[in-house]
Image (spheres, grey):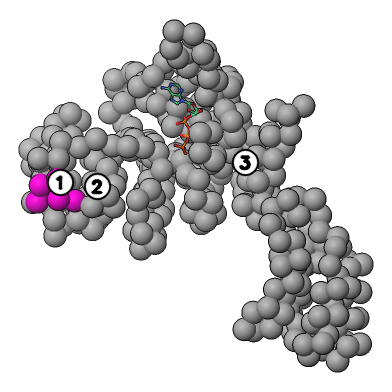
């Protein structure tokens, strides 16, 4: 099957049905439901972001996909085969959350070892190891023992080893973890490059900016439950839910408007802001910022600025951001748990 055809076919590379994992701990057999019956699919050729706060169940899910832990119930099909199928495993690359390396090896030696596990011959191993270490920016250190590597360098080795088998599906658990902003950008570029080559990327993150820049679709998991799955554009509420006003004017007007437009933050925003007033009115070098939550309030605020001798510089309607969606999903879940 030619690679270029795969995305159009939109076939499922990963199908998860009602997957559940319950951990039982200690003599008292205390139960933790880490993953609570989640279902979704990842299509061929897409970059799918698995998003969730700490402890949401991302790593547990990924470990079940890789056959490292057994699900309590539910079914997974990965590249058309059940979890653990050896032929399918050869077509998957995996970066664990906390990869362990034999740190007395050099990165080159380690990649050779991984290449052997994939059954690659010596020359192919050497070529891939060289190319990948170059690609992840480790050529300079490739013949040094990994004991001397920083956290970010080890993360890069982890990415390189996940790609040694030239996998069709790449499963990456927090691939940006431990990387500086340049490293994160490089990894994002690498992931987009993989997609361009027809690969499927399934990765977890709690860094929303990365998901925003990368993902064709996302799944949001909170406390073991899948809250949302879909294209970001579809998940984010299309309605304008606040309007940012940038204005300038005399100090006296600033004080007056802070008084006149002090209250009225919606409940979610008020909870999020420790200092609600500071959140609504902010002084910056470019001018004063005000956040309005209804069209009526925008109209009144603009009129007050003009009447008080100020000038309106910019009015920007804001739609929901991924961060707000994330907080919204997490908030709904918390509510449900309280009731
Ligand atoms: N081996 C285990 N035994 C008992 N509980 C566990 C075990 N592994 C994970 N958990 C619990 O399962 C829940 C989900 O953990 P998991 O590591 O999957 O979350 P995560 O979304 O990957 O979080 P993070 O972003 O912090 O890595 C947590 O409450 C965690 O404490």
Tell me the mark number nearer the camera, choosing from 2 and 3: 2
- Are discs 1 and 3 less than 8 Å apart at CB? no
Picture residue at 28% right of the left edge, 37% below the top = 99
Residue hosting label 3: 230
- C-alpha separation, residue under disc 2 versus residue under disc 3: 32 Å
- C-alpha separation, residue under disc 1 versus residue under disc 3: 39 Å
Q: Which of marks 1 and 2 is nearer the N terminus?
A: 1
Camera sees residue 107: no
Mark 1 lies on a secondary structure that is helix
- What's the mark number on residue 154? 2
* Extent of the magenta region: 144-149
Picture residue at 14% right of the left edge, 40% below the top = 103
Q: Position of residue 163 (x, y in %)?
A: 27, 42
Mark 3 lies on a secondary structure that is strand
- In the image, taking residue 339 as reference, residue 179 lies left or right, namely left
Establish if 210 lies above or below 248.
Answer: above
Q: How crowded is mark 2: few (under 14 residues within 10 Å), some or many (20 or more)?
A: many
- Quarter the C terminus occupies: top right
Comparing 21 with 269, the one in front is 269
Q: Which of marks 2 and 3 is nearer the N terminus?
A: 2
Establish if 269 lies above or below 248.
Answer: above
């Amino acid at each position: 099957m030619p690679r270029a055809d795969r995305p159009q076919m939109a076939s499922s590379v990963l199908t998860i049905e009602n997957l559940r994992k319950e951990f039982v701990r200690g003599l008292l057999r205390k139960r933790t439901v880490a993953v609570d019956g989640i279902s979704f699919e990842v299509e061929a050729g897409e970059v799918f972001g698995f998003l969730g706060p700490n402890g949401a169940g991302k790593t547990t899910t990924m470990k079940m996909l890789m056959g490292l832990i057994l699900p309590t119930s539910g079914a997974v099909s990965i590249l058309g085969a059940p979890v653990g199928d050896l032929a399918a495993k050869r077509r998957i690359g995996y970066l664990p959350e906390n990869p362990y390396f034999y740190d007395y090896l050099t990165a080159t030696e380690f990649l050779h070892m991984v290449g052997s596990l994939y059954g690659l011959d010596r020359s192919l191993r050497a070529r891939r190891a060289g190319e990948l270490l170059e690609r992840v920016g480790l050529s300079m250190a490739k013949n040094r023992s990994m004991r001397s590597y920083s956290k970010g360098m080890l993360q890069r080795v982890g990415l390189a080893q996940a790609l040694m088998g030239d996998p069709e599906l790449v499963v990456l658990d927090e691939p940006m973890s431990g990387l500086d902003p340049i490293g994160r950008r490089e990894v994002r570029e690498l992931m987009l490059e993989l997609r361009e080559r027809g690969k499927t990327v399934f990765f977890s993150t709690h860094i929303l900016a990365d998901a925003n820049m990368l993902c064709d679709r996302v799944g949001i998991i909170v406390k073991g439950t899948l809250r949302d799955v879909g294209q970001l554009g579809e998940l984010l509420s299309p309605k304008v839910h606040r309007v940012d006003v940038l204005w300038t004017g005399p100090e006296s007007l600033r004080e007056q408007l802070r008084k006149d437009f002090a209250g009225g933050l919606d409940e979610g925003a008020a909870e999020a802001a420790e200092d609600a007033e500071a959140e609504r009115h902010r002084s910056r070098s470019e001018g004063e910022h005000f956040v309005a939550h209804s069209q009526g309030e925008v109209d009144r605020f603009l009129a007050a600025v003009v009447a008080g001798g100020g000038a309106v510089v910019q009015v920007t309607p804001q739609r929901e951001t991924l961060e707000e969606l994330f907080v919204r999903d997490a908030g709904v879940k918390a509510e449900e748990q309280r009731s």
